[in-house]
Image (cartoon, rainbow, N blue to C red):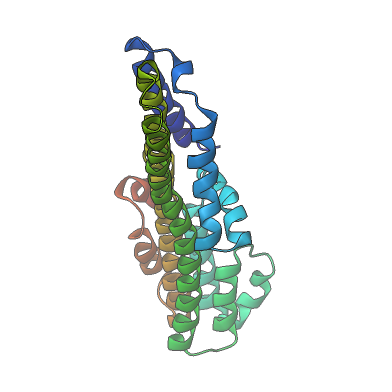
């Protein structure tokens, strides 16, 4: 469970709620079911036009990804590639075939399978980079759907406000109802702004960050696979792979993989 996402959502909503309470207005004043229907459900149904039935329903599982911590085990990947590099230099590339069955990472497994089969390096790079770009394309579609929901919500909020104002203007003779009706009309704009700025835009940013982290790992694996095929010294291979890590992480992993 990604505590940062939970803390962020709870903290934002908490600060808004605290601001309402300390401002002398009760929280129930800001609860309006028609506004929820217009902003939340209205903007969600608009996603059917933007995407598809499966895409609109799939948005919830996409948002769920923000609640999960993505771990890629960089140290394990580097250690495994170094071990395979050492074995390939001692026994030849064909000796790696028996190692592939125990390899759980399908992306790296496919690349090493091509190496064992004697595929040209340029073809291996092209195939692996194509798979990487396809993954990035799928991620971009998911991030785009979240961003779209975030951009639709304020628009639906403004639409709800206009609907409320029209109803208010039709009853101008009732002076006592003008203030309350105006407040209700503005709640939809508040809901749309909160939905976009407290939820959708930050979540889209987190998904983009996750995409960047996974893409970097796969780029590292591509370089590792090609380095093994080229017969690079395992220490040279390790230095190549470590360059993909953040300086703090690099220091910690370096002491382990280059300790001999």
Between 39 and 135, the residue placed more toward the observer is 39
Determine whether 45 is above or below 121 in the image: above
Residue 52 lies in what quarter of the image?
A: bottom right
Query: At which x and y percent is residue 114?
Result: 57, 83
Query: At which x and y percent is residue 199?
Result: 43, 39
Q: Residue at x 59, y 71 (%)?
A: 109
Q: Residue at x 62, y 78 (%)?
A: 95
Is 87 placed left or right of 191 in the picture? right
- Of all residues, the one furthest to the front in this rendering is 173
Determine whether 159 is above or below 187 in the image: below
> Where does the N terminus fall, quadrant-wise?
top right
Determine whether 237 is above or below 21 in the image: below
Query: At which x and y percent is residue 99?
Result: 64, 70
Between 5 and 184, the residue placed more toward the observer is 184
> Where does the C terminus fall, quadrant-wise?
bottom left
Q: Residue at x 47, y 71 (%)?
A: 132
Residue 223 lies in what quarter of the image?
A: bottom left
Query: At which x and y percent is residue 107?
Result: 56, 69
Residue 60 appears in the picture as rendered: yes
Residue 70 appears in the picture as rendered: no
Q: Residue at x 40, y 76 (%)?
A: 232
């Amino acid at each position: 469970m990604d505590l940062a996402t939970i803390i962020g959502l709870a903290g934002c909503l908490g600060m808004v709620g605290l601001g309402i309470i300390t401002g002398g207005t009760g929280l129930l004043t800001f609860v309006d079911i028609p506004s929820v229907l217009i902003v939340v459900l209205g903007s969600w149904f608009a996603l059917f036009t933007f995407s598809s039935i499966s895409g609109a329903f799939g948005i919830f599982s996409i948002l769920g990804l923000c609640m999960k911590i993505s771990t890629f085990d960089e140290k394990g990947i580097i250690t495994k590639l170094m071990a395979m590099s050492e074995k390939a230099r001692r026994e030849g590339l064909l000796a790696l075939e028996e190692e592939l069955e125990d390899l759980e990472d399908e992306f790296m497994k496919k690349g090493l399978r091509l190496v064992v089969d004697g595929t040209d390096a340029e073809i291996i790079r092209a195939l692996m980079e194509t798979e990487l770009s396809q993954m990035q394309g799928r991620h971009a579609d998911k991030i785009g759907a979240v961003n779209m929901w975030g951009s639709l919500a304020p628009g639906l909020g403004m639409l709800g406000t206009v609907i409320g104002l029209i109803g208010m203007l039709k009853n101008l003779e009732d002076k006592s109802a003008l203030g309350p009706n105006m407040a209700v009309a503005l709640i939809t704009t508040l809901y749309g702004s909160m939905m976009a700025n407290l939820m959708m835009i930050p979540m889209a940013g987190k998904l983009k960050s996750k995409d960047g982290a996974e893409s970097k790992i796969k780029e590292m694996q591509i370089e590792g696979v090609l380095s093994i095929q080229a017969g690079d010294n395992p220490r040279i291979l390790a230095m190549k792979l470590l360059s993909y890590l953040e300086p703090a992480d690099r220091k910690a992993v370096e002491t382990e993989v280059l300790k001999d």
